[in-house]
Each structure stands twice: as C-alpha cells, then as structure tokens.
Amino acid sequence: MFTCLLSSLLPSPPFVLFFLLLVVAVLYLTTRCSSSSSPPPPRCSLPSLPRLPVLGSLPWLSRRLPPHLLFSQLAHRYGSVFSLYLGPHFTVVINDHQHAKEVLLQRGRDFAGRPSMVTTDLLTRGGQDIAFSDYSPLWKLHRRLVHNSFTLFGEGSGRLQDIVLSSVDSLCAELLSGGGRGFDPSPAITRAITNVVCTLVFSATYRHGDAELQEVLRYNDGIVQTIARGGLVDIYPWMKVFPNKSLSKLKDCISVRDRLLTRKLDEHKATLSDGDPRDLLDALLKGQTSRSSGSEDEHITDDHVLMTAAEAFGAGVETTSTTLLWILAYLLHHPEVQRRVQKELDENVGAERAVNVTDRGRLPYLDCVINEGMRIRPVSPVLIPHTAMTHSSIGGHSVPCGTRVLVNMWSIHHDPQHWDKPDLFNPDRFLDDQGRRVTPTCFLPFGAGPRYESNLATKHPAVNRSEIIGLCPNTAPSIVLPLSRTNGPFRDKSVL
C-alpha cells in the first residue's frame, strides 16, 4: 500500500514547473514556520541526489518507474545507501540487507518511529493502529495486546483451520465453475480472504453477494485505491486545503468503514461475556478492560480497538490476496513446480482429506514455493517508512533525529550478490543440498526488529494456498511477468 502511495509523490516535469510557480511563496513561508518540527539540512556524508529549495529531490524522481524499481536503479549510481529530499524531508534509502538489518535490528529502537502523513493519519485516526503509530510505551502495550489476541488464531488453532477450510472449499467451487474458460480469479480470492478476516475480526460469515460483505469489499478496495492518490499532501500537508477528489473519496471510504466497525464494536460490547473470546474484537475488549487501571497515557481506547480491527483488513486482505495471486500466476508459468507441489501433497496428505496446519512440517516444498513467492514479489516492495527517533548512524554515516528511512525490500530480494538469477521463480533456493528447508539471511518478507510487520498473511500460510494450487491449469503462455506490477498480476491479460 505504501509503495502505491509513494508512487503518487513522483511528479512529471511539467507539473514540477507549474507547482513551483504556483506555491513557492507559500511553501517558503510554511517551511520557515515548520522548521522547528523538521530536521535541519544535515551534514551527512551519504551520497545524495541533487535538491532544489522547497522541492527537494522531487524533480529527479521519475514517474516512469514505480518507487522500488526507481530506487534500485538509483542505487547503481549512488550506492546501496543514499539520501534524497522528499520536499523538505531528509530521507535515506536502503537497498541492501546488511544496512537494512542495521536499521531494523541492530539500531531498531533508534529507527522505530513513524512519520506523520495526512493520508495515514486519516486512515488510522492519528496513528491509533499498530503499523503507522509512532513507537512509544503505549504502542508496545497495544502491540502486546494485539499479539496476545492473535494467539486465538495461531497455527495450532483448530478454530482458525475450520474458518479457513470452509472459505477455501467455497472458493475452490467458485473457481471450478468457470468451465475451463480463462478468467480473472482476483475478485473471488479477495472475496474469500475478506470473508475469513470478517469471521476472525467480528464473527461474521457471509454468502456471495451479501450486502454487508459487498460494503466491506467496496470500502476496502476504495481505501487501497485512493490512498495511493493522496499525492503531495503527504509531503506538504497544507495542500489538503485544496480540492482533492482522491482525498475526498478516501474520507468517504473511511467513513463507511468506521460506521460498520463501530456498529460491530457496539454489538460486541453489548454481548461480551466472561467466556472465551469469540473473535478479535472480543479479545481486544477483554484486554482493554483488564488494563483499564493503567495511567491515562497508557490506556487502550475504543479508537485503538477500532483501528486495530480496521488494520486487520488492510494487512490481512490486501497482502494475503496479492501474495496468493502472484504465486498462482507463477505456477501458471511453471507447471513443473505445480506438479511437484501436487506430488508432495498426494504423498504426504492424500486426496481423502484437506490439508491442515499440522501437515506443514511434511510439506517443505510447498513452504519453499510460498517463500519464493514472497521473495520475488515482496508483500511490501518498499516498507512503511521509519523515522530516526534519536541521532544515530547507518553504515558509519551520521543520521540526525527526524530522518525518514525507506527500506527497499524489492532490491534486497533481487540482489544478484545473494540470489542466483533473482528474477527467476525458483523455490529450490530455499532448500539445501539435502533437501532441507533453509532461510537465507537476506530473506526479510515482513521486515525485522521492533517494527516487524507481521500480519494475517503469516497466520495460515499453507492451508489457504495448498488446495487452490491444485486447481491451476498445467500450462500457460511462456512470458516474463511484468516487474512493475505490485498490486496483483491478473489485471494484465497476458498473464492468463
């Protein structure tokens, strides 16, 4: 989602000239007034893109490439770690796993902050969620509560398995109903995963075409599509006073989302019992009550509960469906991999029953296929931006407090120094010579450290993919899948 958001910040040259003439005077006054909240131009020894007053490095950031590919290209010229200015914001871009681990792990607390942006503040009520909230004692309390709540649906949970398998059965029936004709599976898969998340979050299971499910699908898709078009308001917040159709639509989608989730929260409050939690909302409410005696600064509010529920849809639906769709696309073009997965399933599970989470240890190649899918098409090609919370350093270069840091996971997962032929889909790279699973140190699909971006995609990685894999046709056109796409492959008809 953030990669799409970032791509909207890369203006075309005519727009740069128009924008400069239109707002340079206002920006000058604004940046002077806000200089206390932004880091001063740092004396940094990192290689840097050129910059202009007010605009920073924006004129040198081409719209012809999405951000992850643009940053990878710039790394060839400036090195794996370089700096630039997004307007007035000093930003460091990381393109290799050594420096990524330094930022995320070794100095994880130094760089655990999040920048405040107009679109994400709207989306999260000013950072009342986990992903976009700034690092603080309250954030740690909130995250611990969410982690404990998700243990309800851990890999040993038969409840999660029943929910997922029911949804997978319905999805497989829908996919098989096409009569052998080519079609886009994206809506069906997104709908099935949304249904799973609705069940996990507020115990609602819907039939195809249900009005409330359609409402959830519309607002979730609207948020994903419009948050990418907020544009320059996330660099120059004062621009939100101007008419902005995408920002208005984002507000409308958020309003629909919040009405639905508030209604579900009120229903759960009215029916909350002393028994085991029914779902995520129950678990969060029970955790909120048990911690209500803490200080006001460390109190989990209803806003935290609502935004956590909302985040489950962004993290659970978008990432899981996109990952699954890319894996299916690659299997279409690598039938030998599909046959090998099917053989492993036949030998270790059989056709008499469905795959369950206890089978995972007997399905190493399926795990490798999933990992390779997340490597070649990272869940977040550019991680959500980090912010330096104190004066620190990266690779021996001084980095001042307030610096924004972007980790280019695409570049890390396609680094030819660590991955042989990185643009080729090859699950065997996650097996050693004895056929045992290995995890390369440069494989970081969800980041690392204090801001590890775990989500529902990691809670049921094998069950929700294995049966669907068996439905893939055995052949597909021999083409190279488009590198620029990050939001799912099947909108390009050449993939089918």
Image (cartoon, grey):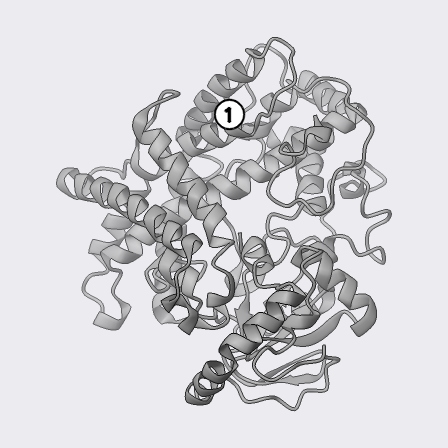
Asked whether residue 87 is in view, the answer is no
Asked whether residue 454 is in view, the answer is yes
Residue 352 rendering spot, x and y as whole percentages: 57, 10
Q: What element carries label 1?
A: helix
Q: Which of 92 and 283 is in front in this view?
A: 92
Q: Name the residue that disc number 1 marks.
A: 188
Q: Which of 269 and 52 is in front in this view?
A: 52
Q: In this view, does 96 lie to the left or right of 268?
A: right
User: Is the residue marked by circle 1 packed among few (<14), some (14-19), or many (20+) residues within 10 Å?
Assistant: some
Question: Image quadrant of residue 205?
Answer: top left
Q: Which residue is drawn at 49% across and 37% down?
A: 155
Q: Which of 156 and 147 is in front in this view?
A: 147
Q: Which residue is drawn at 65% across and 91% down?
A: 43
Q: Which amino acid does label 1 sit on?
A: Ala
Relative to 399, say whether 155 is above or below: above
Quadrant that contains the C terminus: top right
